Amino acid sequence: MRLRNIPGAREAVAASPFCVSADPSMRGKWRSLFGEVCALHLEIGSGKGRFLIEQAKRRKECAFLGMERTSTVMYKALKKLGREEEAPGNLRFVLADAMLLESLFAAGEVDRIYLNFSDPWPKERHAMRRLTGAAFLARYARVLARDGVIEVKTDNRALFDWSEEQVLAAGWRIEAMTHDLHADEHMRQNNVMTEYEERFSALGHPICKMIIRR
Ligand SMILES: C[S@@+](CC[C@H](N)C(=O)[O-])C[C@H]1O[C@@H](n2cnc3c(N)ncnc32)[C@H](O)[C@@H]1O
């Protein structure tokens, strides 16, 4: 995806009250930002924020954190949040690359990870960058709580099938899976659409989803 540079985006993101700096001193302390919450949910590659803003509004008992590595994209999420009449207090963003996950989160600190429409990196030489690959799954295993889960959604069937292989090879359990989420009576319940999901399902692409646990 080619991104237009937005002058001042990085500064605006750094100054936003909804963006927490990617500082290793936050490790083990994320929940303290939110007061009384029962779980910490993290979306990696949170893009323009639609999914998390809606989740945070629907589930006030949980805290939501969006990790995004591109400041121009996060700038758009923060602008969207700023336009909300009442920005949810249980939502924050952090500008960081998922490679840094373990320096930012303590073991067991995260309850749920969402990987929504992750970049497919179709060339084999870029496979290490795919967020559902073995190296990332190992990082997730270390920051997730004992009974923590990961939810993966994508319209990219090749990436989904490859991710399924990676997940099984790494010893994760697939709790639920569909190759057509919007037609699946059970799995579509309470589904919150992401920006990419809206775009691709409008083009007729079926959406794949799996929920995995160690
Ligand atoms: C295809 S977009 C999907 C955005 C959103 N989740 C959605 O479904 O609409 C993928 C996003 O993940 C971000 N991303 C890719 N690799 C990342 C990484 N290693 N760490 C953090 N963010 C990443 C990209 O910058 C991009 O905004």
Image (cartoon, rainbow, N blue to C red):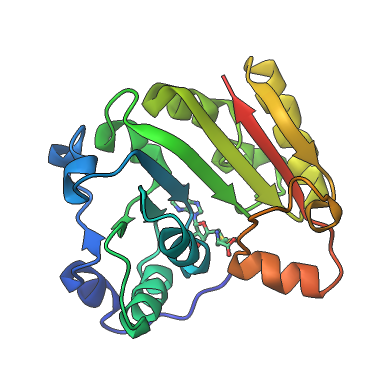
Quadrant of res 60: bottom left
Q: Left or right: 152 with respect to 12?
A: right
Q: In which quadrant will I find the C terminus?
A: top right
Q: Left or right: 42 with respect to 95?
A: right
Residue at 44% of width from left, 55% of height from top? 59
Q: Is residue 133 above or below residue 63?
A: above
Residue at 38% of width from left, 68% of height from top? 74
Q: Residue furthest top?
A: 171
Q: Left or right: 116 with respect to 20?
A: right
Location of residue 9 in the rendering, given as x and y in whole percent from the top left corner: 30, 77
Observer-nearest of 54 and 72: 54
Location of residue 45 in the rendering, given as x and y in whole percent from the top left corner: 48, 54
Residue at 25% of width from left, 66% of height from top? 18
Q: Is residue 180 above or below residue 165?
A: below
- Marks counted in the figure total 0
Location of residue 84 in the rendering, given as x and y in whole percent from the top left corner: 36, 81
Q: Is residue 173 above or below residue 65?
A: above
Q: In which quadrant will I find the N terminus?
A: bottom right
Q: Residue furthest left?
A: 25
Observer-nearest of 210 and 119: 210
Location of residue 156 in the rendering, given as x and y in whole percent from the top left corner: 77, 52
Residue at 48% of width from left, 59% of height from top? 55
Observer-nearest of 101 and 43: 43
